[in-house]
Image (spheres, rainbow, N blue to C red):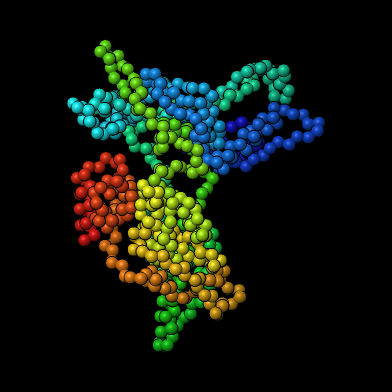
């Protein structure tokens, strides 16, 4: 980046290497930058640096719109069939992930011939034709005499190849002019361009049939689930130790709280209340045993707030910059390469799919979720009333279950993405766990979400009052910050306290990835379809498993085998 942009951003270097590892040239990461605009005064001698700094400030300020309004296609930029092996992109406007405007003023043809990769092309980089890349557009061939290897009965599948078409921002310069003088720049006057054209570049990339690109939200959800599972496991092990309070204090010291700063002070207070008892004194020994039980109950509350603190931090939406890829997805196009009677190759465009997930519309989300999913992350730790109003507007009405802060009450089955059914409601009704705000006890907040069928709940649970403030307060210099939290008070189980009828015991939980042949990819698809563990898989019908797997190439026999393995695992 030029020195002018450095002045505007008030940084030594505004552009950074993104570390894509595929080239040695600098790549713009489009990170959040601080702004500095030039100031002019009477009698100032304006140089090119001053004017360029003003232009750069205007560009950088306008680029912040990507954080307010998102990025993607705003209007137009339709992709439709052209002549032969071409497509045409209509006029339109988009904003890329760096906040730069991409404007197409005229109908623009794009030749797909360079996108075709032959099976023996050493430069295909994995893009050679395969059963996956030339996968079926339409699986049912109803034309009499049609071959199962043909599409519509006349297009051989091995002659089809899909590609993704993108558009990205680019610049060019024009209108050269000779400088009248160099002034303090040194050297002889030269010829410089005086105009920068903000243009675009259309390009393509080999695709994989009907499969969308790897969805970053799957990795985001998986990292959340695995991180939460690891944290809960670590805390569970600490609470089972002989001296859990010391180990828990060490853990919090290493992993400083994000927002619940009272956790550290609370643990210090609990440590100060510990007493040494005489093992030969029966009364003191009994009191010590009772205090130990109460202390473990209190530490389970501390662990709950540690987990909630981690959960809230993970789900915050940061101002992320772009990586080296700043293209905007326009469409997926299928090409047909065949030879005529003389052996001459003839490329034809046969299908253009310019709809999600193969098209990026303007969205404020870092990535776009499929139309059948709802992101629940923004509602975690929101006030319950606020969250419920927003969810109901989207057609989601979760079952509310108020709980006391206790690590053991929110375990497993938690989700941050909900699946929508055909009727506009979630396929698996949701349970929304809520608890009191430690500093505003009368304001309940959302803890997290689980699928309702995983909780066995059937009726609305009345809102529980916040816990009472202890009558005996500690010394003034050791008063815990969060007064509603009871130190040493056993925590009742709200599930057994309010459920009207006992729930049949659920088969033992077995993770899906423990089953033979089920990896993280298949397990994530099953969980997103409401099949959370081996018990759910054992009780599922093959059709439900097929729906959860979507367009993944899994045979009916394999689905039956998966169900049989699950039944054996939970029996």
User: How many labels were placed on the picture?
Assistant: 0
Image location of residue 492, percent across then percent down: 42, 73
Residue 226's x, y, as percent?
Answer: 38, 54
Q: Which residue sits furthest right?
A: 43
Query: For the point 50% across and 71% down, which residue is it?
Result: 466
Residue pushed farthest top? Answer: 342
Comparing 257 with 11, the one in front is 257
Choose between 308 and 536: the one closer to the eye.
536
Residue 334 screen position, x and y as percent: 35, 27
Whether residue 195 is visible: yes
The image quadrant where one finds the N terminus is: top right
Judge by depth and name the residue closer to the eye, 7 or 404.
404
Say which residue appears at 42% left-offset and 26% top-offset. Answer: 80
Is the residue 4 above or below the residue 424 in the image? above
Q: Which residue lies furthest to the front in this view?
A: 423
Does residue 393 sit above or below 405 in this rendering?
Answer: above
Residue at 54% in and 45% down: 319
Q: Position of residue 273 (x, y in %)?
A: 51, 77
Residue sitting at x 42%, y 29%: 165
| Side (left or right) of 497 relative to 564 | right
Q: In this view, does 158 lie above or below 219?
A: above
Instruction: Please state if 65 lies on the left or on the right of 123 as rendered.
Output: right
In the figure, is residue 88 to the left or right of 35? left
Specify whether 497 is left or right of 13: left
Q: Can residue 242 be seen in this view?
A: no
The C terminus, quarter of image: bottom left
């Amino acid at each position: 980046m030029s020195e002018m942009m450095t002045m505007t951003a008030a940084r030594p270097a505004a552009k950074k290497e993104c570390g894509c590892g595929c080239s040695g040239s600098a790549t713009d990461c489009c990170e959040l930058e601080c702004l500095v605009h030039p100031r002019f005064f009477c009698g100032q001698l304006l140089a090119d640096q001053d004017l360029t700094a003003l232009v750069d400030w205007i560009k950088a300020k306008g680029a912040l719109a990507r954080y307010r309004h998102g990025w993607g296609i705003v209007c137009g930029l339709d992709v439709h069939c052209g002549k032969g092996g071409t497509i045409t992109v209509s006029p339109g406007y988009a904003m890329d992930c760096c906040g730069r405007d991409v404007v197409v003023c005229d109908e623009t043809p794009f030749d797909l011939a360079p996108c075709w990769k032959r099976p023996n092309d050493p430069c295909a980089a994995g893009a050679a034709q395969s059963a996956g890349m030339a996968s079926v557009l339409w699986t049912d061939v109803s034309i009499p005499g049609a071959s199962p290897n043909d599409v519509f009965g006349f297009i051989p599948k091995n002659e089809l190849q899909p590609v993704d078409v993108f558009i990205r921002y680019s610049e060019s310069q024009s209108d050269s002019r000779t400088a009248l003088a160099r002034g303090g720049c040194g050297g002889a006057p030269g010829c410089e361009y005086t105009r920068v054209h903000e243009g675009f570049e259309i390009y393509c990339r080999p695709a994989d049939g009907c499969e969308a690109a790897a969805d970053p939200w799957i990795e985001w959800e998986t990292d959340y689930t695995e991180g939460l599972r690891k944290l809960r496991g670590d805390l569970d092990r600490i609470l089972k130790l002989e001296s859990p309070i010391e180990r828990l204090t060490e853990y919090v010291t290493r992993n400083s709280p994000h927002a619940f700063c009272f956790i550290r002070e609370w643990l210090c207070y609990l440590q100060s209340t510990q007493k040494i008892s005489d093992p030969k004194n029966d009364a003191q020994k009994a009191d010590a045993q009772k205090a130990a039980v109460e202390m473990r109950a209190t530490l389970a509350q501390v662990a709950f707030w540690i987990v909630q603190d981690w959960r809230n931090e993970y789900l915050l939406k940061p101002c992320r910059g772009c990586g080296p890829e700043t293209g905007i997805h326009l469409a997926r196009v299928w090409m047909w390469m065949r030879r005529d009677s003389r052996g001459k190759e003839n490329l034809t465009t046969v299908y253009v799919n310019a709809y999600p997930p193969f098209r990026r519309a303007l969205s404020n989300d870092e990535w776009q979720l499929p139309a059948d999913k709802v992101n629940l992350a923004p509602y975690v730790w929101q006030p319950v009333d606020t969250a419920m109003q927003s969810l109901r507007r989207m057609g989601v009405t979760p079952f509310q279950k108020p709980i006391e802060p206790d690590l053991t009450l929110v375990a497993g089955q938690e989700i941050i993405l909900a699946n929508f059914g055909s009727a506009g409601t979630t396929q698996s009704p949701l349970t929304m766990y809520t608890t009191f705000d430690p500093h505003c006890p009368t304001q309940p907040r959302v803890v997290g979400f689980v699928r309702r069928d995983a909780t066995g709940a059937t009726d609305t649970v009345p809102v529980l009052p916040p816990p009472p403030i202890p009558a005996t307060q500690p010394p003034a210099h050791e008063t815990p910050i969060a007064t509603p939290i009871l130190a040493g008070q056993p925590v009742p189980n709200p599930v057994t306290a309010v459920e009207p009828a006992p729930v049949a015991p659920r088969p033992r939980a077995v993770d899906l990835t423990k089953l033979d042949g089920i990896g993280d990819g298949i397990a994530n698809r099953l969980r997103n379809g409401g099949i959370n563990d081996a018990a759910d898989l054992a009780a599922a019908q093959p059709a439900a498993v097929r729906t959860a797997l979507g367009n993944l190439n899994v045979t009916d026999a394999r689905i039956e085998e998966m169900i049989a393995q699950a039944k054996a695992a939970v029996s």
